[in-house]
Amino acid sequence: MLIPLRVRTALVVLALIAPLSACSALMSSATGRLSDNLATALLNQNDPETVRQGGPAYLLLVDALIEGDPDNPDLLRTGARLYGSYAAGFVTEPERARRLATKGRDYGWAALCHELSQTCDIWDAPFEEFEQIIGSLGRDHVEALYGCAAAWASWVQVNRDDWVAVADKARVETMMMRVVELDESYLDGSAHVYLGVLDTLLPAALGGKPEQGRQHFERALELSGDRDLMAKLLLAREYARLVFDRPLHDRLCREILDADPVVPGLTLTNTMAQQGAKELLETSEAYFGE
């Protein structure tokens, strides 16, 4: 049986790092660095199609690394980040997106649990108990808290037609708001981006908070120095279209297309944002009418 090239590439990388298993501490450190470097390389990629096509091999690689070190919160966070981002950003088949996002959410839960034992099994706890535990986490826990919340938010996003899944929105918001309280500038204000998406999942008539969502998107843009083009795209797509504001929508799209997408840590999402802005502008007249 022929093994696909992407899978063979992942296996070669695993073979190269396998000798490190002789020393568990060294292995953990090496795999942690590898996973961090992998995530960074993907975020700095300027060709989304390369990531789309090669993504499954990276997911398999991370799965294999976690299989060999299942209690490593750094690896689990990388798995959560990659699975959540890939499901929400690159997968168009709804059922497949849900499966991948579920795995990302579960990795996120496991990462937070391994790092902070008090958070284990709180996902279905009474909301007051959940809120109390999340509220007890401090500034040193921002990375773990954000990683878990981001993967969970991606799961809610790809399940936005499922009211049971959307009900989890309140818990994700609680986690992201705690991140904002502790360090709102973390990752250039990315917590605000997720909060903006959650607030605009539904129109105001159905319980959504579009104006609050707009404030979160705009704050994220302020914190990123206007460099996070994906935040600007989401402001156009999730807010401006929701409230039927074509002037804002079209202005944001043109600003995205005129911007330089190459920003360390944001190049991939900025490039995707430019593709999205082009599509939004092309469908603007059909969506808003004359």
Image: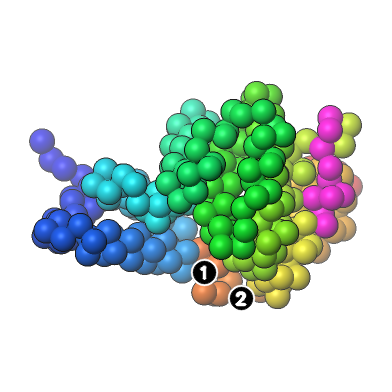
The x, y position of residue 25, in whole percent, is 24, 61
Mark 2 surroundings within 10 Å by alpha-carbon count, few (fewer than 14), some (14 through 19), many (20 or more): few
Measured Cα–Cα span from mark 1 to mark 2: 13 Å
Q: What element carries label 2?
A: loop
Q: From the image, tell me which residue sits under label 2.
A: 260
Q: From the image, tell me which residue sits under label 1.
A: 265
The x, y position of residue 160, in whole percent, is 65, 32
At horizontal 23% and vertical 47% (from top left) the residue drawn is 68
Q: Is mark 1 on a helix, strand or loop?
A: loop
At horizontal 47% and vertical 64% (from top left) the residue drawn is 43
Location of residue 19 (image quadrant): bottom left
Location of residue 192 (image quadrant): bottom right
Question: Nearer the observer, disc 1 or disc 2?
Answer: 1
**Compared to 229, does 74 lie above or below?**
above
Disc 1 to disc 2: CB gap under 8 Å? no
At horizontal 49% and vertical 48% (from top left) the residue drawn is 116
Q: What residue type is labelled 2?
A: Asp
